[in-house]
Amino acid sequence: LTPSTSSRGHRGISPPKSSRHPQRHLVANSSKGGASDVVGEVFTNLLGFFKQRVDLALEDGDETAISRIVARSTSGGAFTREGPSADFATWAVDLSIFVRDPVAAGPIDGKIAARTERTFVTLEMVFVPRDKDVYPSRGAAFVTGSRFFATEKNGNNRSAGYWLGDEPGFFKFALPATTEIAVANTVCVPCGQVFFNEKIELHGNDDDDAGGEATGPDVSETGKRKSTKTKTNPRLVAGVAKVKRNVPTTFMGANYSGILAEFVIVGTFTARRRN
């Protein structure tokens, strides 16, 4: 016979005392679980609501600029046997490198930079749109036709380089230097990862601030036509390239180099979109 929580249907039978408590506990636990499920669902919905609002806010600002930097051209973009096609976002990077050994010399300041000789390298960069469901935004970066950098690995759609949008107002990317950049006997950029960081500057179309004499309600006090368009086209300015350097460290005669590291600027660069 199965004990019941009601005695009406089985007046002549009383369930054993030992079975009452488990039955009551079971009902109570089920009730608590249902309440916690409701609270959990409400909490999840609230988190989803706020996450959506935060994502929209980011997309309206820095994320929008980054989206334009890595956006495909109007003709699309595809991977070929030679790698990513030129229909992906293609940028020309003009890198100005200090002729000095960053590992041996260490950090560089403005005074040293002003009197240091430079050498120049141009890179053709391809930025693939952001990876799905990844925050901060990031995606693959390829370099094409370079003697010093190589990014392809494990197939055409995989890269050893990447771009990153983890700091408001800045766009970053990293490339592996597979061949050191040297002038005479000075290694200016050693083999290894090189980190590029540049500021995002928004501007309008070329005709936004047209000069010349003009009259009417859209004319400023200087006599030039006011801009009526929102500045949404990104430029990459004030770029610096860095490498990681292990800081020489000793303690009581023992060498502890490799425990501490610092980033050393190896050059500056500008970037302009090609498509």
Image: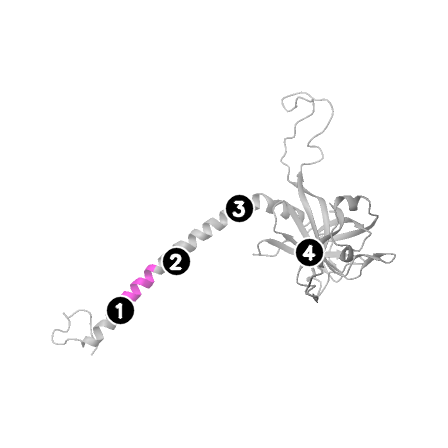
The disc labelled 1 sits on which kind of residue? His
Question: Against 209, is 43 above or below?
Answer: below
Mark number for residue 40? 2
The disc labelled 3 sits on which kind of residue? Leu
The residues colored magenta run 26-35
Mark number for residue 262? 4
Q: CA distance from mark 2 to mark 3?
A: 24 Å
Q: CA distance from mark 1 to mark 3?
A: 46 Å
Tell me the element at label 2. Answer: helix
Q: CA distance from mark 2 to mark 1?
A: 22 Å
Q: CA distance from mark 3 to mark 4?
A: 36 Å
Disc 2 residue crowd, few under 14, some 14–19, many 20+, Cα 10 Å: few
**Residue 10: where, in percent of width, then height?**
14, 74
Which residue shows up at 73% across the image and 27% down it? 211
Q: Main secondary structure of the magenta part?
A: helix
Q: Is residue 242 left or right of residue 28?
A: right
First in sequence: mark 2 or mark 1?
Answer: 1
Tell me the element at label 4. Answer: strand
Which one is in front in this view, the residue at disc 4 or the one at disc 1?
A: 4
First in sequence: mark 3 or mark 4?
Answer: 3
The answer to whether mark 1 and mark 3 are in CB contact below 8 A is no
Disc 4 residue crowd, few under 14, some 14–19, many 20+, Cα 10 Å: few
Which residue shows up at 21% across the image and 76% down it? 18
Tell me the element at label 3. Answer: helix
**Which residue is the extreme one toward the front?**
252
The disc labelled 4 sits on which kind of residue? Glu
The residue to which callout 3 is attached is 56
